[in-house]
Amino acid sequence: MDKLLIIGSTGLVGSKVAYMASEHGFEACGTHNARKSPLPHSVQLNITDRDATLRLVSNVHPRAIVNTAALHSVDYCETHRDEASSVNVEGVRNLGEAARQNHSRLVHLSTDYVFDGKTGHYTELDDPHPLHFYAETKLKAEEVAARIPSYAIARPSVIYGWNPLEATATPSSSGKTINFAVFVLEKLRKNEMVKAVSDQYSSPTFADNLAEALLRLAKYPDNGVFHTAGRSCISRYEFAVKLAEIFEYPTRLVEPVHTSEFKQMAERPKNSCLRVDKAEKALGMKFLTADEGLAEMKKQGMSHDVSRP
């Protein structure tokens, strides 16, 4: 059985990849940073440590490496630029060097935020134009990954779902909540109002759907960039309303607001929706709409406090 090395195996996407790996004929090996992974073959790794990264990949000798590790918080990256560059760019450079030395394929997780959001419905042929430093680091990481002999770059958008390792939202290093859907559901469960922006559009991506795509990309023979996002193009407000409806909470608890009301440090794209036709055809799979993804999330959520039977 081929080995798959999952960088960031305790995060939302990494944990999904780990749990689904055997279905694709992989023996999953994982890395974790702060929180220990439940995988039997998991080690602590900081990808900014070049020597440790090269040593680990050499020892594991995986067929493919799936990199889900990054500093995700947009505003945190604005004020911690050295750290963001170290993790998001140099970390990928280290993984790329290790992949090259061991003849491993690198599947790198990027973001829809590489686009400026002026047009929306982006394809892989559209030119990226980052609006903020986080997006700049992710685009640089794409350029680094694309120099490796065997690579795939996956661009999702607003990833959501249950992390199998936890029942609550995952905080980032900056203290922000990464998983927007779980954050909204926790607020609704407490009967608290949720403010969601009505003027930012994206393609919410169900984590299980994304993990399936990453595992298929790990075996896919060709290099390239692939948009691996949900099929819906909706605002955060519309997504939050769908959450309330599907999980049977009052939609009156969801309040639309404009982006300007949040006073965010970095500008966000107005419309970063992605076209997924290329990935669907290449990988032989279907990406879910927001309704379909949230329905699946509800089915899985019977063991989570924030869902309703």
Image: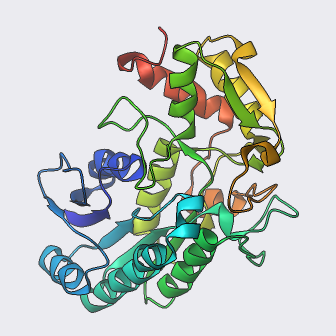
Which residue is more in the foreground, 7 or 63? 7
Q: Residue at x 79, y 46 (%)?
A: 259
User: Can you say whether 48 is above or below 229 in the image?
Assistant: below
Q: Is residue 263 left or right of residue 147?
A: right
The quadrant where residue 154 appears: bottom right
The colour scheme of the drawn protein is rainbow
Q: Position of residue 266 (x, y in %)?
A: 69, 62
Which residue is more in the foreground, 155 or 69? 69
User: Can you say whether 45 is above or below 26 in the image?
Assistant: below
Q: Is residue 21 left or right of residue 188?
A: left
Q: Position of residue 187 (x, y in %)?
A: 55, 23
Quadrant of the image containing the N terminus: bottom left
Which residue is more in the foreground, 61 or 127? 127
Q: Residue at x 33, y 70 (%)?
A: 65
Q: Position of residue 78 (x, y in %)?
A: 59, 68
User: Can you say whether 234 is above or below 217 in the image?
Assistant: above
Q: Is residue 223 visible?
A: no
Q: Is residue 142 visible?
A: yes
Q: Residue at x 33, y 48 (%)?
A: 15
Q: Residue furthest top?
A: 309
Q: Position of residue 105 (x, y in %)?
A: 37, 77
Q: Is residue 228 left or right of residue 141?
A: right
Q: How many numbered badges does the structure rendering display? A: 0
The quadrant where residue 305 appears: top left
Q: Residue at x 39, y 67 (%)?
A: 67
Which residue is more in the foreground, 247 or 22? 247
